[in-house]
Image (tube, rainbow, N blue to C red):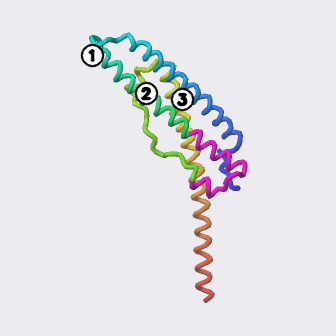
Amino acid sequence: MHRVADINPRVIEALYTEALVLADAARSRFDQLRSRAGDQSHGHGLATAAAAEPDHVHMVEVTCEALRTTTRVMHCLAWLLNHRAWLAGQISTVQLRRHGRLISHFPASDASIVSRLPADLADLVAQSERLYARIQRLELAWRDNGAAAAGAIERLRERLAQSTLRAS
């Protein structure tokens, strides 16, 4: 099993624990914010429905940001679980390369929405972005290392083919 220096069981486990804690914190905090907003909206009657419109738009934006944040963390968890399985010998390097990719261009959070979130929630969004960026760097390093190894194998194959042609 060929390992990149930055990807080892301790790093993967630490990131996995961090991602689990972050996923739970983000989910519960976004749920709490939506629940509180829902409790406040029950008092609106037809006469105040127009005044409540901006609040509904904001809640849709918050819900979209909640989805982006939790999905970002779930992608991190999936990547980490695949690497845990690889390190444990449960899947091969080929399987990991085929099924263990991190999405390279995940949609960024909307800064205007995040700026209107409570400070603790905005911090959780930022933490999810930093976690994703760290895992993305590990992914790129791991893929680059594998590409270098694949390149070396390809060069060896070319040399073997050339020597076979000369021998003929």
Q: Which mark is residue 127?
A: 3
Is residue 90 part of the magenta span, yes or no?
Answer: yes
Task: Work out whether 153 lies above or below 75.
Answer: below
Task: Work out whether 12 lies above or below 113.
Answer: below
Q: Which of pointers 3 and 1 lies earlier in the amino acid sequence?
A: 1
- Quarter holding the C terminus is bottom right
Say what secondary structure mark 1 lies in: helix
x, y percent for residue 29: 53, 21
Query: Badge 1 is on which residue?
Result: 50
Task: Work out whether 28 lies above or below 130.
Answer: above
Name the residue located 68 percent from the left edge and 38 percent from the top edge.
Answer: 13
Residue type, label 2:
Thr
Q: Which of pointers 2 and 3 lies earlier in the amino acid sequence?
A: 2
Name the residue located 59 percent from the left edge and 59 percent from the top edge.
Answer: 148
Q: Which residues are magenta?
A: 76-98
Is residue 133 part of the magenta span, yes or no?
Answer: no
Task: Work out whether 95 lies above or below 25.
Answer: below
Q: From mark 1 to mark 2, how far is it between C-alphas?
A: 20 Å
Q: Which of pointers 1 and 2 lies earlier in the amino acid sequence?
A: 1
Instruction: Say which of marks 2 and 3 sits in front.
Output: 2
Name the residue located 49 percent from the left edge and 23 percent from the top edge.
Answer: 30
Badge 2 vs badge 3, beta-carbon distance below 8 Å: no
Query: Badge 2 is on which residue?
Result: 63
- Is 122 situated left or right of 25 in this image? left
